[in-house]
Image (cartoon, rainbow, N blue to C red):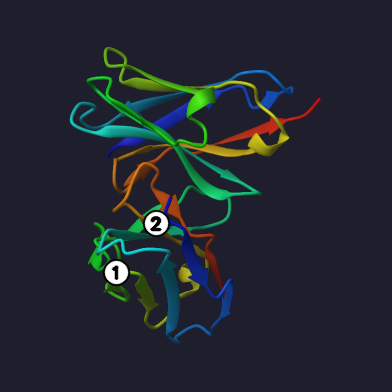
Amino acid sequence: QVQLDQWGAGQLKPSETLSLTCGVSGGFFTGYYWSWIRQTPGKGLEWIAEINHSGNTNYNPSLKSRVTISIDTSENQFSLKLRSMNAADTGVYYCARGQETRDFWGQGTQVTVSS
Amino acid sequence: EIVMTQSPATLSVSPGERATLSCRASQSVNRKLAWYQQKPGQAPTLLIYGASTRATGVPVRFSGSGSGTEFTLTINSLQSEDFAVYYCQQYDNWPPITFGQGTRLEI
């Protein structure tokens, strides 16, 4: 069974950078796109970005200027960096597998931005 | 970007009855429409893709229909574990993929 485990700091101050990593186990890492999705009180579920094992990326245009997604195929991990965090970025961040639909999800990380 | 609108925001139904949830797209998404279920404190889980194909392990009481801009998720013979929030998601025109705001199904 595919399992996604995510980790990273969940408490940030305004202007700081969010860094999250998602580790994948129990299935193939290559051949899939890997995504970050967030759920905020203001916008609900919002797709952030995705990457595949070759490093091909797609970004949500609304966040693209602040986001970097990267992948480490040797560790079966992928990561998210979201710069210049503000209160509107507070929410739960998920990693997930898939490009069109997401069939496996991480457990979620509560991220709170507060001074 | 395509805007997905779900209705109603909250649906109250009794166990054993049928629930019908709607999702409308701001432009045609053909049949590139998925449904997810989310329970409190959990990540969403994929129920339906391609508008009507059940994901692995999804009970047959869940069915999806529609194409273009109008879609429906029907849940027959509601079980206690079905009370949750349901989201639709389009993947016809991306990036970005977009989600509806959700329908809360309550007892």
Tell me if residue A104 comes above or below residue B79 in the rendering.
Answer: above
Q: Residue furthest top?
A: A74
Q: Nearer the viewer, residue B71 or B16?
A: B71
The image quadrant of residue A60 is top left
Q: Which x, y percent locates residue A87?
A: 72, 34
Query: SS at mark 1?
Result: loop
**Marking on residue B68:** 1
Residue at image position (58%, 55%) is B40
Q: Which x, y percent locates residue A16?
A: 67, 18
Residue at image position (38%, 77%) is B75
Q: CA distance from mark 2 to mark 1?
A: 13 Å
Residue at image position (45%, 75%) is B21
Query: SS at mark 2?
Result: strand
Q: Quadrant of the N terminus of chain A?
A: top left
Tell me if residue B40 comes above or below residue A72 in the rendering.
Answer: below
Tell me if residue B103 comes above or below residue A8 in the rendering.
Answer: below
Earlier along the polypeptide chain: callout 2 or callout 1?
Answer: 1
* Residue corresponding to mark 2: B89
Q: Which x, y percent locates residue A75?
A: 31, 14
Q: Residues within 10 Å of mark 1 (few under 14, many from 20)?
A: some
Is B90 placed left or right of A42 in the picture?
A: left
**Marking on residue B29:** none
Residue type for callout 2: Gln
Residue type for callout 1: Gly
Kindly report which numbered mark, 2 or 1, lies closer to the viewer in this rendering: 1
